[in-house]
Amino acid sequence: MAASWRLGCDPRLLRYLVAFPGCRSIGLVKGALGWSVSRGANWRWFHSTQWLRGDPIKILMPSLSPTMEEGNIVKWLKKEGEAVSAGDALCEIETDKAVVTLDASDDGILAKIVVEEGSKNIRLGSLIGLIVEEGEDWKHVEIPKDVGPPPPVSKPSEPRPSPEPQISIPVKKEHIPGTLRFRLSPAARNILEKHSLDASQGTATGPRGIFTKEDALRLVQLKQTGKITESRPTPAPAATPTAPSPLQTTAGPSYPRPMIPPVSTPGQPSAVGTFTEIPASNIRRVIAKRLTESKSTVPHAYATADCDLGAVLKVRQDLVKDDIKVSVNDFIIKAAAVTLKQMPDVNVSWDGEGPKQLPFIDISVAVATDKGLLTPIIKDAAAKGIQEIADSVKALSKKARDGKLLPEEYQGGSFSISNLGIFGIDEFTAVINPPQACILAVGRFRPVLKLTEDEEGNAKLQQRQLITVTMSSDSRVVGDELATRFLKSFKANLENPIRLA
């Protein structure tokens, strides 16, 4: 039995939608309720029209860390026209902390790569690619107009030709070859023009050789006493117009000011007076921004203490005999975590309005990389053993240097430790990592002779292995008295490794 779909619409509109008036495969039959289309109509073509296509799925630059504002496309892992399933890796994005893989959230076909790999400084929310559903014509996908184009790809800085300086044309006086040229203050210029005098008749006494008002008044006095005569430059004889020489066209103003030195040409030796611009990565820019904000908004206070590592070094040697390799820094991390558990008032942060007590003890460990200083986190450090802490530090440090840290591995933290002892630094002060309240700066351990007493009360010299630690604390939440008690407890825990078990 023949079947039909009824469309209650104007036949002219139907012909416009189908776009095939008179096509034999489409039968229009007028029924009681309007016009109908027979089942034999070519609906495959009907559905392939542009107005029935679904909107492409937009791939936007995501926010992969709390401090991320821009990202770089390191590499696309899929090609245009390649099928994509939910969870597949699309591309690698360099954030302000590491290189993170962006996964697809829908199935389909990667139709368009809007931002090519190698592009830098792409703002959050910018369109970087498009995905269409399977079966759609991915080759003719159009970029949505409601999404603005991404920022231009940053290119290596190239020397730009310096703009041609404007040639100053004096209104009342011309510079006479052979005479000195001065930088005139506005008042001095007015006085000299009023009395028909030239600055070369006097001496400039102002800073950086400026001819001041007082210098001009001194010339007026000399003119009034007859010691100098009026100076009016004679007009130069008319000359045959010739093409200006390069020296004339690039001549500077009569009273030039210091100019910024030009950028040197990449690949060529730097000329005198030039500089080379060094491109800054996202990580470097974020580090600079956060350090500046920390030093300018957080009131830093400092406290220093010396700790004896004799017992720690002895325990470390015993562990080495059992083929357990740990570092002194692992003991320091454990001692700081145990002390924070004993003194929860220090395990706080400042959220912009007031202090906030943190329920976890996560230690951020500063790791130096070629891209900058990163701070991977040892989660729940107080509950971990020394060997477990050592394994975590090694694994996270390697991932930080390889640029493969995941966001959850460096975001957060309640306390930071920065150790420069491996570089031979005795002691230093570190900048607080907001919103944390404290950071512990650790120097190298060094042998020191100290005068002690034996069991019989006799004085003797004994060598000690001391280490200097300096805690920078946010005075808004950790006062001097609290910071002092924390260092005292930290020292006692570190000098007695049995407490760390």
Image (cartoon, rainbow, N blue to C red):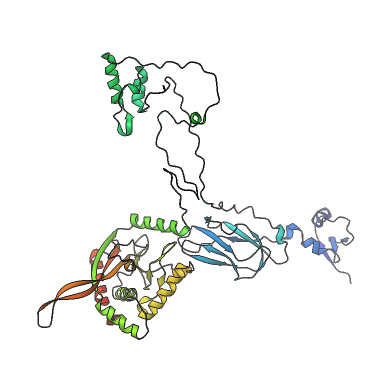
Task: Please give left or right for residue 33 compared with residue 299 in the image.
Answer: right
Q: Is residue 312 above or below residue 196?
A: below
Give the residue displayed 29% in from the left and 82% down from the top: 315
Give the residue displayed 52% in from the left and 28% down from the top: 245
Give the residue displayed 29% in from the left and 21% down from the top: 217
Query: Measured from the top left, where is residue 128 in percent x and y?
Result: 59, 58
Give the residue displayed 37% in from the left and 60% down from the top: 352
Q: Front-most of 248 and 377?
A: 248
Q: Front-most of 145 and 65?
A: 65
Q: Is residue 241 above or below residue 343?
A: above
The C terminus lies in quadrant = bottom left
Task: Examine the image and state in which quarter residue 243 appears.
Answer: top right
Query: Measured from the top left, where is residue 233 in percent x and y?
Result: 40, 17
Q: Front-most of 29 and 481?
A: 481
Query: Measured from the top left, where is residue 11 in percent x and y?
Result: 84, 55
Q: Front-most of 402 and 408?
A: 402
Task: Examine the image and state in which quarter residue 497 appears.
Answer: bottom left
The answer to whether residue 98 shows anywhere in this view is yes
